Image: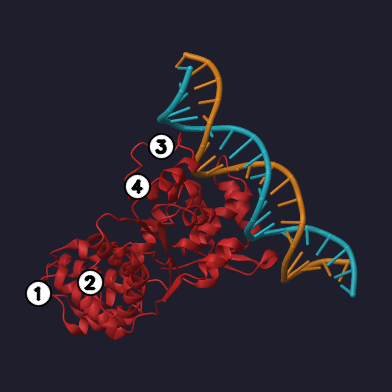
Chain colours: A red, B cyan, C orange
Amino acid sequence: MITDERVFTEGFVPGDVVHRHDQLGRLSGALRPLTDGGRPENALLFGPTGAGKTCAARYVLRELGERVPDAHVGYVDCWADYTRFRVLERACEAVGRAADVHRRSTPTDTLAERLRGVDAPVVLVLDEADQLQEPAALGDLYRIPGVTLVCIANREPELFATLDDRLASRLRTAARVRFDRYSTAELVAILRDRAAEGLEARAVTDDHLRGLADAAAGDARVAIGALRAAARSAVRHDRERVTDADVVEAVPAAETLIHERTVERLTDDQRALYDLVREAGEIAPGELYERYEARVDDPKSRRTLRNYLAKMAHYDLVERDGETRGRVYRIVEP
DNA sequence: ATTCCACCGGAATAGCGGGATA
DNA sequence: TATCCCGCTATTCCGGTGGAAT
């Protein structure tokens, strides 16, 4: 049934990106001067999750790598690597100058110096750029000659809000590329390609793909995850074809899987906090802090709990309603 | 209307862990 | 081996905010 798992993973970049021709053209147009030694434009990619931003960026990066072999290309997920040090470390990896970098002994400033010494052009994709805890990292990279940035974020104002005025005004001249949610028909086309590459022939019908695409509400990540979930469900039941029942279950199954993976990544203290919110369903901050302090030995400070809760809210594990005194924390059901 | 105060979140600071250096 | 150094996490401090109490 499933012939190639990789086709359904997050980082997979298909050989042919469908329904994103405008965006691909704009992005590769901004970078085109690299092919003849010219000066490329920085680029900003905006759009909701699952709209193909990361996929488009990776596709163009790969293409560029083939067309301009001496250029260095790199990809940074700023959600995972959110400090100046980590971002610059990734950039050094992209240019092959990170072999001896060590967390505890290489000062951040020397990483920037290393990049400065690179002659060949460097293109860096900074995914989830608005999630950087130290947005100064963007400025560090921007100031290095020969480095071109492709910043990805959900919404433009949120990205610019994190930047200092000088950098913000400079980046306003960058090429902007907007991504909208996919239509159901577009998602079906995407799923058809993935099914052709990753599943046995006739494992899934067009009607099934349409059902998955419809339930995914324009989000390609959900749609592709659901296709995999449907295929796995069929495998589990020892069938060679996906059935209607597999499809109905698939979207919630994919969402539950993402949710569980996220919960697993929490530390013990974060998990205790999360469990308390889930047990209560909805809870006021003061009450939550007290219960937490009663439950664990050696509790973290309240300020730290607020950081945890902010993190969990971002992961969509909890929801926050209201400001200051009126605030409540609520569990998010997958 | 005014005061109160629970709570938020930014900024500065401290402590930890562990590679580098001598 | 002892000391230095540096990124990272947690803590401390605190000004700001808006709902509740007076």
Amino acid on which the number 2 mark rests in the picture: Ala
The mark nearer the N terminus, 2 or 3, is 3
Quadrant hosting residue A40: bottom left
Q: Is residue C3 above or below residue A250?
A: above
Describe residue C4's horizontal placement relative to residue A197 as left or right. right
Amino acid on which the number 4 mark rests in the picture: Glu
Quadrant hosting residue A41: bottom left
Q: Which mark is residue A93?
A: 4
**Mark 4 vs mark 2, CA separation in Å:** 37 Å
The mark nearer the N terminus, 1 or 2, is 1
The mark nearer the N terminus, 1 or 4, is 4
At x 38%, y 49%, the residue is: A90
Q: Is residue A43 above or below residue A106?
A: below
Residue A35: x %, y % from top left: 29, 64
Marks 3,1: beta carbons within 8 A: no
Judging by the rendered image, the residue that carries numbered circle 1 is: A201
Q: Nearer the viewer, mark 1 or mark 2?
A: 1
Judging by the rendered image, the residue that carries numbered circle 3 is: A102
Residue A95: x %, y % from top left: 33, 48
Label 1: state its secondary structure.
loop
Judging by the rendered image, the residue that carries numbered circle 2 is: A230
Do dots 3 and 1 share one subunit? yes
